Amino acid sequence: MYALGMSASSASPNTKDRRPDRTVLCRSHFPAFPHTRRGKSGQQSAKKVWMNILELPQDTSTGEYHGKFLAGHNFRNYYKNHLNCRVDIYGVWGDMDELMCAPYVLISSPEKVNVDKCIMYVEHRIRDQEDQKGVSRSGGRRVLRGESRHSADM
């Protein structure tokens, strides 16, 4: 899914960020607040927002993906009120045999800096879960700003 977003012609306009996991600008896929505005006709039209995704860790022995821990009430309030982001977790509820892709976290906001801050926050929560539960992500840990690849894998 991320590769599809990156293929958009204006995925990262006017930025010098060319990392493969960068935050991208795209049309919001949500028809309701907070990423919509009303046009002159009164109809809602989706506006462009910044988005990024994070892979969720998986327990290789059971095949279970870990992501429900990110959906707690306190976390959701923090995402919305302090980081000004919408955080949606996909693929951790329901039948795993019906998934079209590996479960992930989608982070979106009208401001790129908010998404980047939220990525750091959620990445650290996922790393804590990996360390506590002994789970991992097939793509490995994301390298955050200021980290080297070696320190992210530790």
Image (spheres, rainbow, N blue to C red):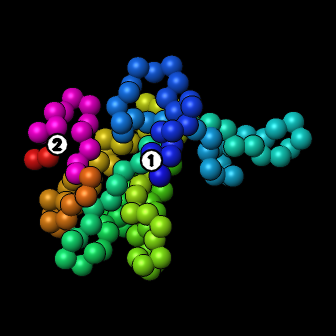
Amino acid type at mark 2: Ala
Three-letter code for the amino acid on which mark 1 is drawn:
Tyr
Q: Is residue 8 above or below residue 125?
A: above
Percent position of residue 34, x then y: 62, 46
Q: Which residue is mark 1?
A: 2
Q: Which residue is mark 2?
A: 152
> Which residue is located at x 21 percent, y 29 percent?
146
Distance (Cα) linking label 1 and label 2: 20 Å
Farthest right residue in view: 41
Residue 79 in view (yes/no): no
Residue 117 appears in which quarter of the rendering? top left
- In the rendered image, residue 149 lying in the magenta stretch gets the answer yes
- Expressed as whole percent of the image width and height from the top left, the position of residue 131 reads 14, 59
> Which is more toward the observer, 141 or 9?
9
Q: Is residue 46 above or below residue 58?
A: above
Looking at the rendering, the stretch of residues picked out in magenta corresponds to: 140-151
